[in-house]
């Protein structure tokens, strides 16, 4: 597989607010979404980004992950408050990510509007660069991924092996195996990522309609795992651009990834409309920090 970012996807530039909010009405139900404040970012886990920035060899990724999990399971505070099963690695990792630990999990949501919030919420974050009078907000992006092929892989496994495990149980087993046996899914021709929710969630995941995509082979980049899971070549090739809005409906028939690039000129209007629809920090982060950050709308003139 190439180490280039995932190609084989269509991209669509959105520069009209009303058009942006029509997207969710066009896509079918089997799509999940991830918002990026910077449209040039690839999809990567926080652990992958951290190790790359520190130039740490991927060979040590599994060892670092093991140390994180062992440290968490020794925490009396976490054990008493959450009472997670020791072997439930999926729930442990999602809990750690919730509190800021860098893991291989990549956050997604079932709600296009929630992903849109994360793509536009750069406006609410402090940034010294904005003190420059010539500053311009960056183009944002929402990645959409079809889960149809991933769901079919689970069903195929159940039928071929005549197993009685539920979809959720199979996903939990895949995650646990990938954690315990680092090379278990290396060069796998059946499973490359797990898409779903852990057994134990929390208020934030529920509020954000959140779920995770878990790469099974930690030795290669997240997007390479995703390419293999969706049957993409991973090779660089021309990226077709959608020319009309109705192309989205057609493109979802034969594409598993669509990237929506959002013009920087409409970010403020999108954020304001999301707030009117009840999507802001106060709702998505049901703790005091979410409420406090929601007050930033006054400073931006969005309330």
Image: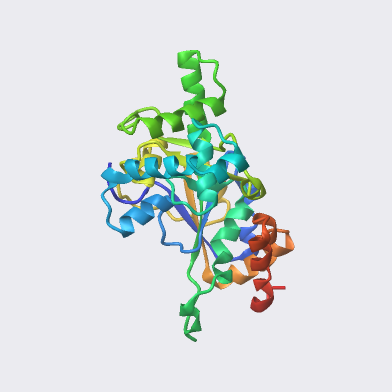
Counting from the top left corner in percent of width and height, residue 87 is at 49, 30
Q: Quadrant of the C terminus?
A: bottom right
168 sits to left or right of 241: right
**Camera-side residue of 69 and 124:** 69
Q: Is residue 232 above or below residue 102?
A: above
Q: Is residue 92 above or below residue 123?
A: above
In the image, what residue occupies the spot 60% across and 65% down?
Answer: 16
Q: Residue at x 55, y 32 (%)?
A: 85
Residue 133 place in picture, x, y as percent:
49, 86
Q: Colour mode? A: rainbow
Query: Is residue 43 in sight in this rendering?
Result: no
Percent from the top left, x then y, of residue 144?
52, 48
Q: Is residue 259 visible?
A: yes
Residue 235 drawn at (x, y percent): 30, 46
Residue at the far front in the pictured view: 76
The quarter of the displayed image where residue 272 is located: bottom right
3 relative to 255 in the view: left or right: left
265, 168: nearer the viewer: 168
Looking at the rendered structure, the number of numbered marks drawn on it comes to 0
Towards the viewer: 176 or 39:
176
Which residue reaches farthest bottom? 133
Give residue 54's quadrant in the image: bottom left
Rendered residue at 44%/56% (across/down): 241
Looking at the rendered image, the quarter that the N terminus falls into is top left
């Amino acid at each position: 597989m190439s180490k280039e970012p995932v190609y084989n996807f269509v991209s669509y530039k959105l520069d009209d607010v009303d058009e942006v909010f029509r997207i969710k009405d066009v896509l079918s139900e089997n799509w999940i979404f991830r918002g990026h404040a910077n449209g040039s970012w690839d999809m990567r886990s926080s652990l992958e980004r951290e190790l790359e920035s520190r130039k740490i060899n991927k060979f040590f990724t599994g060892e670092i992950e093991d140390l994180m999990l062992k440290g968490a399971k020794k925490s009396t505070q976490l054990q008493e408050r959450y009472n997670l099963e020791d072997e439930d690695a999926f729930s442990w990792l999602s809990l750690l990510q919730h509190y800021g630990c860098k893991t291989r999990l990549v956050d997604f949501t079932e709600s296009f509007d929630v992903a849109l919030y994360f793509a536009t919420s750069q406006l609410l974050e402090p940034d010294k660069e904005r003190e420059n009078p010539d500053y311009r907000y960056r183009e944002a992006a929402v990645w959409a991924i079809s889960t149809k092929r991933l769901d079919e892989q689970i069903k195929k496994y159940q039928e071929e092996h005549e197993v009685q495990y539920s979809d959720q149980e199979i996903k939990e087993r895949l995650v646990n195996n990938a954690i315990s046996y680092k090379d278990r899914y290396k060069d796998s021709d059946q499973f490359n990522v797990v898409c779903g929710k852990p057994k134990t969630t929390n208020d934030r995941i529920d509020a954000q309609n959140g779920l995770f995509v878990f790469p099974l082979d930690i030795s290669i980049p997240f997007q390479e795992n995703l390419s293999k899971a969706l049957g993409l070549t991973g090779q660089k090739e021309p990226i077709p651009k959608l020319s009309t809005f109705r192309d989205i409906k057609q493109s979802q028939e034969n594409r598993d990834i669509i990237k929506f690039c959002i013009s920087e000129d409409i970010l403020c209007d999108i954020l304001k409309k999301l707030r009117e629809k009840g999507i802001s920090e106060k709702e998505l982060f049901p703790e005091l920090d979410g409420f406090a950050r929601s007050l930033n709308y006054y400073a931006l003139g969005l309330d």
